[in-house]
Image (tube, grey):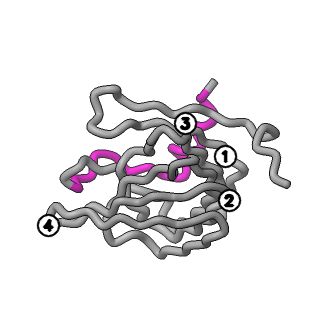
Amino acid sequence: MLDLDAYDWREISGDPASPYRIHHEICVLGSDRDAGTIDLLIRFDAEGGHCQAHRHVTTTSVLVLAGEQHLDELRPDGTKVHKVRHAGTHHLTPGDPYPHLERGGPDGAVLFFSHHTSDGRLYEIVDLDGRVVHTVTLDSLVASWEAMP
């Protein structure tokens, strides 16, 4: 059985003025800069906490370990497409065509992510109009993790 308390979790919270609640926990399991890989866990609470709207720009493998992963794809025409992935579901993407909002379901969620990048980029943070406001790289994510208390 997976003991989630055995992992080193760091809390991520966003601007309270955001139109959606930014709140989740992250645990970097390991990374290899030379190989361009990073593995991590994300834990969402049951209170609707999201990560920032983003689009994966590299190959990403996701495994839902507990709960449900809820995604709202943000389409260029302003519509949203809602997707739900249940515990035990695996998803592999070579990169997302659309940015999305991501959160846990009614009981929260625990997700395993494995990112594989050839150019260092992992994902783009976007505003709700889909404009890129920041690109997260393997190096920037590792540096951010190492700097967190």
Q: Is residue 44 left or right of residue 66?
A: left
Give the residue type at disc 4: Asp
Residue range in magenta is: 130-148
Would you say residue 136 sits in the magenta stretch? yes
Camera-near label (3 vs 2) is: 2
Report the residue at 60% width, 37% height from top: 145
Q: Which residue is mark 2?
A: 65
Where's residue 37, x and y in %?
63, 61
Helix, strand, or loop for circle 4? loop
Camera-near label (2 vs 1) is: 2
CA distance for labels 3 and 1: 11 Å
Question: Dot 3: within a 10 Å radius of its alpha carbon, few (fewer than 14), some, or many (20 or more) residues?
Answer: few
Where's residue 54, x and y in %?
37, 54
CA distance for labels 3 and 2: 24 Å
Q: Which residue is mark 1?
A: 28
Is the residue 37 above or below the residue 23 in the image?
below
Give the residue type at disc 2: Leu
